[in-house]
Each structure stands twice: as C-alpha cells, then as structure tokens.
C-alpha cells in the first residue's frame, strides 16, 4: 500500500529533525560550539536547504516561462516579497498544515451559497485548504475536502473519489449543485470528473494555478499523474501530453463556460504560466504570487470568495 501524503511529509520532517540534530551534535562534540548556537545552526542548515529547493523551483520555471505582461512585472522588492511569501507558504503547508491534516466535511444548513468541494494538487493533501476553510467557516458555507490518493496515481483513478465526495456533500447539504475549488492538479481532476459524470452537479469550477496545458516542471515529477501533466516545452503546438489533449477534446463549450481559472504570472511550478489560461473559461490573472501561496494569499482568497458569492442566488 502506498504511503499517504501526510505520512510522507511526517517522514520528511523526521529526516529534517534528525539532520538538524546531527549537525547540532557534531558542533557540540567536535567544535565546542555552545548549545544555543549549535541548535540554531542545525535548524538554520535545514532551513537553508529548504530555501534552496524553493529557489531552484523559481530557476527551473524561469527556463520555461511565458512572457510576463508589463503590468505584472516586478522590481527587486516585488521579487523578494514573491520569494519570501512562497518560501513561507511551502514551509508552513508542508511542515504544519498538511503534515497534520485529515479530510473532513462541514455542513451549514442555512448556507446561502452552494457547498464547496476542495481538491488539492500534486503531492499535497486536504491540509492545503486550511486558510480557505477558515473563510468558508466564517461565511457559513458548507464544504468538504478529500485526499487524492495514491499520491502518484493516475488522475483518472481520483475521479471515483470525487464522485463519492460530491454526491455525499450534495446529499448532506441538501443542495442540487456544488462549487469545486481546485488547486493545480486538482483542477485537472475536476475536469476529468466532469468528463466522466457530466456537469449537472456543477455550479462552478474554480481552479487555482492549474496546468490546463501541462507544465514543463512535471518532467521532473514521478508517478502517472506527473506524466499526464507533462509539457514538452515553453510553447508550441503538441506540447501537451496525450492525456491533456484528449481531455480538452472531450469538453464542450458549455463545460468550459463553467470554469474560472485563476492564475499567477509568477507561478514557480506551472511553466509556462499561461498554461493556466483555458479557452472558453473565465480566466483571471494575478502577479507577484507563487504556486503554493495561491492557497493563502489574501488577494486570491478574496477573489475565490467573490466567485463563490456570485453563485449564492443562482
């Protein structure tokens, strides 16, 4: 049986703790460094490695980047803020929220808006939605999250999980339709679900940083799902995987019209960033925000809540 994302993250945290402890011990034992400085250096070394991983994602995405429109270009301070927010987002989500998360459901009988089904992205779990779930709770909007597993499985294999979750959420809330909010790969899962089960249950699908036309960074990923999200290069016809092309060919204009694609021109995982532009959908562009930070940035969360609110009286 494959390991869950939560267990994988917990195992990685243990490895990082052991590494920090080993560095601390070596400094105490062999270099006569004080306990406080030794501990700080051990933890600092681990954080530095994690910072370099985030920096490498930005370097890799720049190789396959789409052109940034003039209105979204950043100065030195803006780039520093972008990197800092993305580093903190990856640190907090992987080391705290997702390492502790379990999928759940919250029902508000008096909710004005349709219930919301939350679908996370590649290598993540339901903990990715901690910040949005707080907003949904504050607005008394029914919602449910689920963990798409196995972590490296086929996107098609997640479809039955989504169908069961969607039917349960609609039954529990008494709503005929729901809104899907999906990050990254989750947006492709939502589209695959609509292909398999139709859109009768769908009020809206809101995708955040979804590689609708693939991402070149998926070439560095593992698993069947990573292969399905691969892209041959920054631009050019036929760059998408066969699976992505088949998915696109299966969709009607009415299905596409149900989708709102929110994306950032500074996405450090989806490259080219314009891969998130889905023809026929409502495409909303942002700048100065990284890939993981899409789930916690106030500007993005405000826009998602606004999109949900448009369905309240429909």
Image: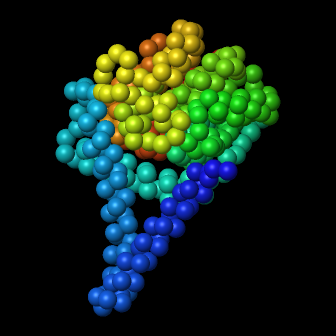
Q: Which residue is at the front of the view, 269 or 247?
A: 247
Please count the marks in the image: 0
| Horizontal and vertical percent position of residue 198 | 67, 16
- At x 71%, y 42%, the residue is 105
Q: Which residue is at the front of the view, 116 or 96?
A: 96
Image check: 280 left or right of 309? left
| Horizontal and vertical percent position of residue 164 | 75, 32
Q: Which residue is at the front of the view, 99 or 132?
A: 99
- At x 41%, y 78%, the residue is 22
- At x 54%, y 28%, the residue is 188
In the rendered image of this protein, does residue 128 appear above or below residue 226?
A: below
User: Would you say residue 250 is visible in this rendering?
Assistant: yes
| Horizontal and vertical percent position of residue 35 | 38, 87
Quadrant in which the C terminus is drawn: top right
| Horizontal and vertical percent position of residue 107 | 74, 39
Image check: 89 left or right of 175? left
Among the 4 quarters of the image, the one containing residue 309: top right
Among the 4 quarters of the image, the one containing residue 25: bottom left
Image check: 35 left or right of 176? left
User: Would you say residue 36 is visible in this rendering?
Assistant: no
- At x 31%, y 18%, the residue is 236
- Colour scheme in the image? rainbow
């Amino acid at each position: 049986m494959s390991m869950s994302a939560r267990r994988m993250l917990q195992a990685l945290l243990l490895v990082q703790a052991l590494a920090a402890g080993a560095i601390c011990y070596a400094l105490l034992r062999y270099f006569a460094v004080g306990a406080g400085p030794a501990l700080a250096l051990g933890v600092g070394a681990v954080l530095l490695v994690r910072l370099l991983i985030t920096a490498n994602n930005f370097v890799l995405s720049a190789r396959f980047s789409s052109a940034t429109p003039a209105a979204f270009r950043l100065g030195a301070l803006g780039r520093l803020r972008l990197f800092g927010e993305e580093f903190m987002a990856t640190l907090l989500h992987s080391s705290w929220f997702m390492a502790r998360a379990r999928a759940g459901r919250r029902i508000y009988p008096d909710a004005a808006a349709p219930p919301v089904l939350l679908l996370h992205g590649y290598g993540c779990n339901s903990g990715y939605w901690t910040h949005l779930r707080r907003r949904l709770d504050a607005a008394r909007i029914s919602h449910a999250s689920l963990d798409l597993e196995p972590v490296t499985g086929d996107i098609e294999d997640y479809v039955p999980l989504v169908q069961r979750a969607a039917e349960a959420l609609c039954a529990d809330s008494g709503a005929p339709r729901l809104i899907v909010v999906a990050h990254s790969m989750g947006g492709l899962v939502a589209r695959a679900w609509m292909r398999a089960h139709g859109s009768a249950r769908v009020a809206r699908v809101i995708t955040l940083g979804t590689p609708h036309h693939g991402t070149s960074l998926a070439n560095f990923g593992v698993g069947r799902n990573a292969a399905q999200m691969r892209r041959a290069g920054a631009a050019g016809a036929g760059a998408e995987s066969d699976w992505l092309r088949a998915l696109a060919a299966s969709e009607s204009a009415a299905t596409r019209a149900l989708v709102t694609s929110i994306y950032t021109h500074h996405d450090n995982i989806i490259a080219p960033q314009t891969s998130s532009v889905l023809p026929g959908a409502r495409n909303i562009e942002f700048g100065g925000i990284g890939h993981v930070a899409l789930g916690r940035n106030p500007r993005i969360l405000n826009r998602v809540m606004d999109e949900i609110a448009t369905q309240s009286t429909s």
